[in-house]
Amino acid sequence: MQLQLNSLNILKKRAEEGIQQLTEEELHWKPSEESNNIAIIIKHLSGNMHSRWVGFLTTDGEKPYRDRDMEFIEGNESREHLMQIWDDGWRLLFNTIENFKAEDLFKTVTLRGQPLSAFQAIQTEIAHISYHLGQILYIGKQIKDKDWIILSIPKNGSKEFNQKKSRI
């Protein structure tokens, strides 16, 4: 599970580097009424993580206390609040994965009443988290445009990147 933790840490860090580039006002910007802004995505990911990772092996992944619909309502939350719930959700995920044993991967868990292996549930969650982290970075880049600091390989920068990598 160490490989999963490393990959998840990289995804989390990259999203945070993107979020840090934005003002509090920009975290609440959205291109249209039906779109989600970054603040909403953070609330949704946090709600999802609090539901999925609490009692992962022993309770349904969709907890009765979760109010998913409220996650998608703009609330003008502060950056501090958003980052607190962000960190809390990730802490639950990391604690669960860190305490996993190899045999736990083959246990059956439920998600919205549907049985699946713990391994499948983890894969589903990683895909879900990755999807929304991509949205965060995409929205951030839309807001900042040319002022966005590229967090991976810049356009037309692959050759230079590969040359630097080959010298290491």
Image (spheres, helix red, strand yellow):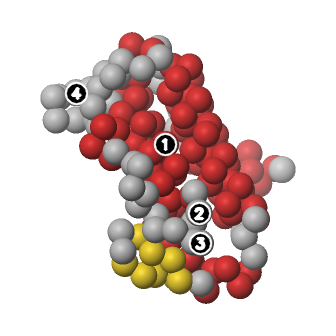
Indicate which disc residue 46 carries.
1
Label 1, secondary structure: give it.
Answer: helix
Q: From this viewpoint, is residue 107 visible?
A: yes
Q: Along the line of sight, which residue is nearer the eye, 99 or 9? A: 99
How much space separates mark 2 and mark 4, taking CA atoms? 37 Å
Q: Is residue 151 visible?
A: no
N-terminal label among 2 and 4: 4
Q: Residue at x 71, y 85 (%)?
A: 103
Q: Is residue 48 left or right of residue 103?
A: left
Closer to the camera in the image, 117 or 142: 117
Q: Residue at x 52, y 68 (%)?
A: 59
Amino acid type, mark 4: Pro
The answer to which quarter of the image holds residue 70 is: top left
Above/below status of 30 relative to 166: above
Mark toward the viewer: 2 or 1: 2
Give the residue number, with chain letter if any, for mark 3. Answer: 57
Query: Of discs 2 and 4, which sits in the foreground?
Result: 2
The reply to whether discs 2 and 3 touch (Cβ–Cβ < 8 Å) is yes
| Number of numbered labels in the structure image | 4
Q: Tag 2's secondary structure?
A: loop
Which structural element holds mark 3? loop
Tell which circle, 1 or 4, labels the residue nearer the N-terminal end: 4
Q: Position of residue 41 (x, y in %)?
A: 39, 38
Look at label 2 and name its amino acid: Gly
Say which label, 3 or 1, has the lower sequence index.
Answer: 1
